[in-house]
């Protein structure tokens, strides 16, 4: 009898928890350009229910094999990004237009520099020694964001409710719409 009561209590408690406001649910989706999956799209949510999420480990924009890794990095406004040099050559990371403007100067293998992204916006990164190196850091004013993988897929965990979503990709228009986290179905983002 006691085991049945415990099982019933746990079942009722779980049901109550999933119906409570502020319950976190996944928002999954896919981004496409001309019907093809698009990697490196940044999707973020705004204007929804209040909630926070713990910050992950400090984000890293690495320099390896004469390229930036990752190609696109999304961060929350106020985040400090690490810029290690893992190459055997000097690099000079800078961003001079839009977003955060900075110039880290020349630094060798093993050295690490830091930049705090204190305003929302897109920062295009370059290296003045290696002109083919380019990447983006997208600073968003949200706790709920993701970057699409090679299949164009993303997942954002956020409190259930209705949000304004934004989607950014290099060379494309900024898309905006409304989505309800916790509703059935996936968010399909499409650029023509």
Image: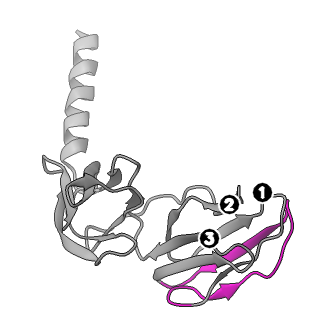
- Of the 4 image quadrants, the one containing the C terminus is bottom left
Name the secondary structure under disc 1. Answer: loop
Binning the other alpha carbons within 10 Å of mark 2 as few (below 14), some (14 to 19) or many (20 upward) gives: many
Q: Residue 106 placed where, x, y %?
A: 83, 78
Kindly check if marks 1 and 2 are in contact, taking CB atoms under 8 A apart as contact: yes
- Region in magenta: 97-119
Binning the other alpha carbons within 10 Å of mark 3 as few (below 14), some (14 to 19) or many (20 upward) gives: few
Name the secondary structure under disc 2. Answer: strand
Q: Write down the quadrant of residue 82 in the picture.
A: bottom right
> Residue at (52%, 72%) from the top-left corner?
136
The residue labelled by disc 2 is 62
The residue labelled by disc 3 is 132
Q: Which of marks 1 and 3 is nearer the N terminus?
A: 1
The residue labelled by disc 1 is 86
Q: Residue 125 placed where, x, y %?
A: 59, 76
Between 106 and 5, the one lying in front of the other is 106
Q: Which of marks 3 and 2 is in front?
A: 3
- Residue 179 visible at all: yes
> Residue at (42%, 60%) from the top-left corner?
40
Residue 33 counted in the magenta span: no
Between 75 and 93, the one lying in front of the other is 93
Q: Residue 118 placed where, x, y %?
A: 56, 83
- Residue 30 visible at all: no
From the viewer's perspective, is 33 left or right of 63?
Answer: left
> Residue at (48%, 75%) from the top-left corner?
139
Name the secondary structure under disc 3. Answer: loop
Q: Which of marks 3 and 2 is nearer the N terminus?
A: 2
Residue 107 counted in the magenta span: yes
Q: Write down the quadrant of residue 144 in the picture.
A: bottom left
Q: Nearer the viewer, mark 1 or mark 3?
A: 3
Most common SS among magenta residues: loop
């Amino acid at each position: 009898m006691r085991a049945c009561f415990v099982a019933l209590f746990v079942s009722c408690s779980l049901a109550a928890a999933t119906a409570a406001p502020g319950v976190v649910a996944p928002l999954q989706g896919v981004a496409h350009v001309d019907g093809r999956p698009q990697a490196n799209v940044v999707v973020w949510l705004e204007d929804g229910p209040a909630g926070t999420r713990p910050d992950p480990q400090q984000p890293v924009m690495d320099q390896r094999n004469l390229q930036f890794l990752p190609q696109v990095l999304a961060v929350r406004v106020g985040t400090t990004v690490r810029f290690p040099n893992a190459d055997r050559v000097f690099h000079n990371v800078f961003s001079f237009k839009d977003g955060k403007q900075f110039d880290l100067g020349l630094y060798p293998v093993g050295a690490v520099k830091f930049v705090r992204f204190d305003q929302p916006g897109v920062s295009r990164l370059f290296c003045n020694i290696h002109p083919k190196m380019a990447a983006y850091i997208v600073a968003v004013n949200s706790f709920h964001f993701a970057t699409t993988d090679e299949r164009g897929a993303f997942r954002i965990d956020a409190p259930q409710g209705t949000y304004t979503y934004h989607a950014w990709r290099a060379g494309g228009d900024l898309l905006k719409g409304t989505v309800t986290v916790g509703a059935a179905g996936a968010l399909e983002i499409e650029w023509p």
